[in-house]
Image: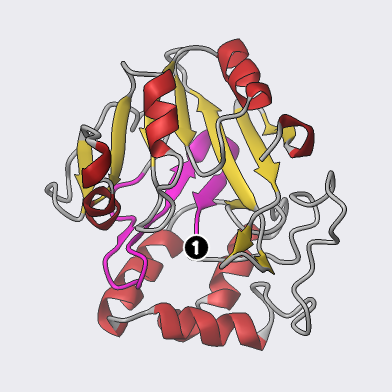
Amino acid sequence: MTSQQTVIREVVKDIWTFSCPFSRFGFVPVGGRSTAIKLSSGDVWVLASTPLNDATKSKLSELGPVKYIVSADAVHHLFLGEFKKEYPSAKLIAPEEAIKKKTEEGLTFDGSWGKDPEDTTYGFEHDVCHLSAYFSGHQNKEVVFFHPSSKTLIEADLLFNLPANEQYSKSSSSGRIPLLGNMIHPWHGLHKKLAWAAGVDKAAMKRDCKAIADWDFKRIIPCHGDVIEERGKDAFMEAFKAFLD
C-alpha cells in the first residue's frame, strides 16, 4: 500500500497507528493497521501488520529505534520480513503458528507464543503486557497486548470494529463490506456468532477471555476497523459474552 493511502496518527500519548486499505481474500474490505508504542526506555515496539512504506519508516524513525517487532496471530505475518530487514537488530516475536509459515524466508525469531513457557518475558513488559494473553483456543492463535498507562488494548483478529472508515479514508472505496454493512462490530449479533465460531477450544477461550476481562482498559486498537476510543471494555465484554457468562 502506498504512503499516500496510509493514515498515521497518535491515538494517545506514545501510541501511533498506521492504517491503510486491505481486503481479505482480495475483495472483503477489512482494512489493515500496524501499531507502534514508544516505550519508557525510548525504544519502539511495533505490531507489524501493514507494509513498511516510506511514510511509516519516516514516522518510526522519529519515534526512536525499533527494538521489538511482533506478530499478533497466525495470519498477521505478511510484512514481518520487510520490517526485520529494515530493523535487523530488533527482536522478532510471533505465535508459533506464524513462525511456521515464515520458515522459507529464513527469518530468525527471538520468541514464540505457544512454544515458549507461559511466563516468558521478552523485555518490553514494563510498558506492554502480554502474559496470560495468548489465545490458544482461537483459530488464529491470537495474542492480545495491553498498554496500562493509556488503558489501551491492542489486538488483531480477536475483535473487529467494521466498517473500516479510517483505513479507507484516503482511498476511493467506502471500506464497507457489501451486504453486511454495519453488522461486524462488537455489539452486533453477527460478530458474537463469528467470535464464538472462532473459538475452536471453548474451554481455553473462556479461560483467556476472563483473563483479559480483568484488565483495566477503555480503548481498543484493532487491526481491522476503527479504533474504539471509549467503552472498549464494554465492547469486549459484549462481544465475548458467551465466553464470560
Direction from residue 113 to residue 151 in the image, left or right: right
Direction from residue 45 to residue 191 in the image, left or right: right
- Quadrant (top left/top right/bottom left/bottom right) for the N terminus: top right
Disc 1 packing (10 Å; few <14; some 14–19; many ≥20): many
Q: Quadrant of residue 138?
A: bottom left
The colouring scheme, among rainbow, by chain, secondary structure or one colour, is: secondary structure
| x and y percentages locating residue 194 in the rendered image | 52, 82
Which of these two is toward me, 213 or 84? 84
Residue 238 inside the magenta-drawn segment: no
- Quadrant (top left/top right/bottom left/bottom right) for the C terminus: bottom left
Q: Is residue 245 visible?
A: no
Q: Quadrant of residue 142?
A: bottom left
Residue at 44% x, 52% y is 76
Residue at 62% x, 11% y is 62
Residue 135 inside the magenta-drawn segment: yes
| Region rendered in magenta | 130-156
Residue at 56% x, 37% y is 51
Give the residue number, with chain letter if any, for mark 1. Answer: 157
